[in-house]
Structure formats: structure tokens, C-alpha cells
Image: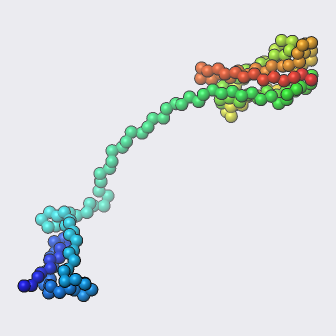
Amino acid sequence: MKKILVLLVAGAALLLLPTTGKPAFGQTSATATPLPTIAPLPTIGGIPPPPPPPGAATATPAPSATPVPTNTVVPLTISLKLAHSSVAVGKSQKATVTTLPGASVDIRVTFPNHKLKSHPGAASAAGVFSWTFKQPANTTTSKSRTVLVHAVASANGTTKSVTKKYKIK
């Protein structure tokens, strides 16, 4: 009895080959290894569909909703740095406040004799506000040489403050 090997080629061509039942060149057993089955391309009446013409519209995915950015309020912070820990009469002291850019800032200096100096303003785009002032004479008392520097920053309906000290020489 003769065996016939049927080979499917993509597109529907058939190849019929008689077999002898003996191993083919390079095979080691009497049974032939089955070939993998290949699914045929979809066809209409045996003819595959043509490719779309150049420039033809293709299916595009529907646009997804773009996330809307939310306004995140950055919390108000404040720090105060004094240039000197002690200042002689007639010499300068510098107070530097760091806070939110554009925040309203007020620096108030209270001397031991309760006299006041103040300097209001707004923080720069970098969030910095500085004021340099001279240490006035006759502001000490017999009990104190300590000056209080109080800074207040306000932004977005919030207010924060900080106080530092220095001594009059």
C-alpha cells in the first residue's frame, strides 16, 4: 500500500507526494514527523482581501480624557536669619525672611526699652525678603540688652510667624 503525504501551503495549493514508508534522508525512525498545521489566510472565494489603498483612513482609537491639573496650595512656611548675634550701637543688623514667593512679610524689631522699628513688604519670586537697619543708641535698659526680631508672613489666608534675638554690645 502506498502512502501519500499531503502538504498544505498557505493560499490553498496542495502538494501530493507519494511516500515509500521508509525514513527519508536524515530521519532515524520509520515514522515520519508530522508537519505543523498552518491556518489559511481569510479569503473570499479563495482570494485573499487586498491591502488598504495608500492614504486610506484607518481605525483610530477614541481620544482619552486629558487629566485636568488641580491647584495644589503649597503650605506657608517661614524662617528668619539674623546676620549677627550681637550688634554695637550705630552698626547694621540684617534680618532675612524666607517664605513663599509673593507672601506679605512684616519684620518688627522690639528693643529692650520697648521702642519699635518695622519694615513691611513682599517676598521676592525666590521667596526672600530682607531688611538692613542700624542699631539705634539709647535702647537698652538696666535689666536688658536683648533685642527681639519678629517676622510675620501671610499668604493664601494663612499667617505664620517666627522670632529671633540678638544682643546689643
Residue found at x 25% / y 84%: 28
Residue 131 appears left or right of 46: right
Placement of the C terminus among the 4 image quadrants: top right
Q: Is residue 107 above or below residue 56?
A: above
Placement of the N terminus among the 4 image quadrants: bottom left
Residue 53 appears left or right of 123: left
Residue 61 appears left or right of 101: left
Q: Nearer the viewer, residue 161 or 106?
A: 161
Residue found at x 17% / y 87%: 22
Taking the image as drawn, is residue 36 in sight?
A: yes
Residue 34: where, in percent of width, then height? Answer: 20, 75
Taking the image as drawn, is residue 139 in sight?
A: no
Q: Is residue 26 above or below residue 110?
A: below
Residue 164: where, in percent of width, then height? Answer: 78, 23
Q: Quadrant of residue 72?
A: top right
State how the image is colored: rainbow
